Amino acid sequence: MENSENAVNSFVENNNELVVNEEIKSNLLVFAKWGRFLGIICYISAVFMFAFGVLFIFAGSLGINWPGIGNGLSGFGTIYGVSMFILMAIYGIIYIFLGKYLLGSTKNTKLSIEQNDQEALVKGTSNLKKLFTLLGIITIIGLCIAVLYIIVMGIAIVAFII
């Protein structure tokens, strides 16, 4: 393995080209299979999120008692249902984009390996870049919300103690 690495490094240094050997092709095909599976799961999850969001709206408007919240007819249950629908719709839309980028990446990556197509590999890695950019943005937003929550809870605890 070390000899093949040295040969590849020497080839790359001399030709300034990327070498996609059989091991890399095999790894990319495994990525394409699992990525396709996860992309489909993203779409299925999005459908469930939208369905549960709609369920929250109807449950709130029908007067179903929410644990710790009260009767939907009191007004707050309906607000709770609508706000949960909005939250679930946002999550569903995010999952649709994650699935779209993941399936696009896997489709083009598999096509590039099967047909030895450089342009398809470029498209596949472009979709992968979009996927990781979206995941990075979501992570940053989540961390900011967590820090904000900790600050607000700290202030609330201090205010409650005093």
Image (cartoon, rainbow, N blue to C red):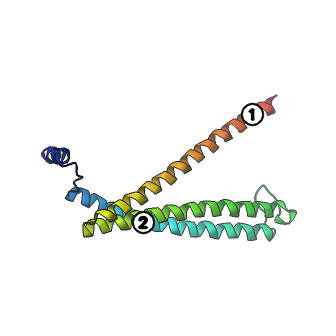
Q: CA distance from mark 2 to mark 1?
A: 45 Å
Q: Nearer the viewer, residue 128 or 61?
A: 128
**Residue 115 visible from this viewpoint:** yes
**Residue 25 horizontal side relative to residue 131, left or right:** left
Query: Please, what secondary structure does the residue beneath circle 2 have?
Result: helix
Residue type pointed to by label 1: Ile
Q: Nearer the viewer, residue 161 or 90?
A: 90
**Residue 43 horizontal side relative to residue 89, left or right:** left
* Vertical side of 132 occupied by 47: above or below: below
In percent of width and height, residue 113 lies at: 27, 65
In percent of width and height, residue 90 lies at: 63, 60
**Residue 76 horizontal side relative to residue 32, left or right:** right
Quadrant of image for the C terminus:
top right
Neighbour class for label 2 at 10 Å: few (<14), some, many (≥20)?
A: many
In percent of width and height, residue 21 lies at: 20, 57
Q: Nearer the viewer, residue 105 or 23?
A: 105
Residue type pointed to by label 2: Gly
Tag 1 or tag 2, which sits nearer the N-term? 2
Quadrant of the rendered image containing residue 123: bottom left
CB-based contact (under 8 Å), mark 2 and mark 1: no
**Residue 33 visible from this viewpoint:** no
- Residue tagged by mark 2? 104
Which of the labelled discs sits on residue 18, or is there none?
none
* Vertical side of 124 occupied by 5: above or below: above
* Vertical side of 7 occupied by 51: above or below: below
Q: Residue at x 50, y 61 (%)?
A: 98
Q: Residue at x 54, y 49 (%)?
A: 137
**Residue 86 horizontal side relative to residue 24, left or right:** right
Q: Residue at x 74, y 68 (%)?
A: 57
Quadrant of the rendered image containing residue 48: bottom right
In percent of width and height, residue 149 lies at: 68, 41
